[in-house]
Image (cartoon, helix red, strand yellow):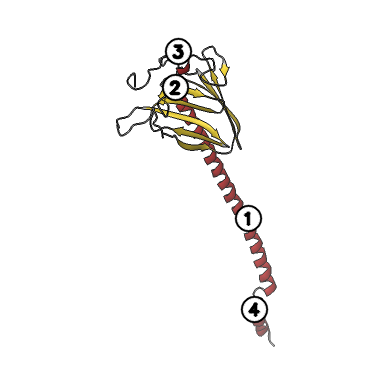
Amino acid sequence: MNRKKMDKYAKYKLAYGFSLIELLVAVAIFAAMAAMAWGGLSSIVRTRADLVREQDDFRALMRAVALFDRDLRQAVVRSVRSNYGTATVPAFIGAADRMEFTRLGFANPQAELRSNLQRVLYQLDGDKLERGVYAVLDRAPGTQPQMTVLRDKVGAFRLRYLDAQQRWVAAWPEPNGNAADGTSAALPRAVEVHLETAGYGEITRVIELVSDWPTTDPGLPGAGS
């Protein structure tokens, strides 16, 4: 065999491709790299979803606190009739874990013939913080508040009220208050709120109420707005 034919055979020999074992090794390496890349991508997606969920939860908490703050700052001296009209409910009623009051600023975008005052209440029902609104100020026998859950998984909801003598009391009106001198109709000077929530611990707010409203109750319909 001459040298020319030997060079031709050598070229064909060098043109051989990968063996089956080499292909299997390459595929195995590619599969391992793809699995690691997928695991990292999946972890990023889960982390982002958890972050979005926590952000939404925090925004919901801040909205609840802001709503609470807004309602209290708009509290006014306006007592209401009870469900059967036999008694007058004070403008502001507060207990250790519940309060009910009349507030200003009930939006009326359609200019309906109704008051811009609204009766609201806050209470802890189990582990849920609820806000209730009454459709009318002076109630009929079947009038019930429409309740909305502001926050669940609430560990505690505690309230205190600051009176005119700068003392914190656990209930409003004070047990020794006298309706004749207007004590039962007056507003506290401030409300201290303690809210314990899962994931965020305890939130404490001291909300000052508007102090320049009239100190006497304008009364029921016919005596004021």
Residue that numbered label 4 is attached to: 11
Mark found first going from the N terminus, 3 or 2: 2
Which mark lies nearer to you, 4 or 2?
2
- The alpha-carbon separation of the residues under discs 4 and 1 comes to 45 Å
Q: Quadrant of residue 90?
A: top left
Quadrant location, the N terminus: bottom right
Q: Residue at x 57, y 17 (%)?
A: 168
Residue that numbered label 2 is attached to: 91
Quadrant location, the C terminus: top left
Q: Any mark on residue 39, and which? A: 1
Q: Are marks 3 and 2 in contact (CB under 8 Å)?
A: no
Which mark lies nearer to you, 4 or 1?
1
As rendered, which of 79 and 207 lies closer to the eye?
A: 79
Mark found first going from the N terminus, 2 or 1: 1
As rendered, which of 89 and 189 lies closer to the eye?
A: 89
Type of the residue with mark 2: Ala
Mark 1 surroundings: few (<14), some (14-19) or many (≥20) residues within 10 A = few
Residue 94 image offset from top left, x and y in percent: 52, 24
Residue 119 appears in the figure: yes
Residue 98 image offset from top left, x and y in percent: 53, 28
- The alpha-carbon separation of the residues under discs 4 and 2 comes to 102 Å
- The alpha-carbon separation of the residues under discs 3 and 2 comes to 14 Å
- Residue 31, above or below 90: below
Mark found first going from the N terminus, 4 or 2: 4
- The alpha-carbon separation of the residues under discs 3 and 4 comes to 116 Å
Q: Are marks 4 and 2 in contact (CB under 8 Å)?
A: no
- Element on which disc 4 rests: helix
As rendered, which of 1 and 37 lies closer to the eye?
A: 37
- Element on which disc 1 rests: helix
Q: Residue at x 61, y 57 (%)?
A: 38
Q: Any mark on residue 180, and which? A: 3
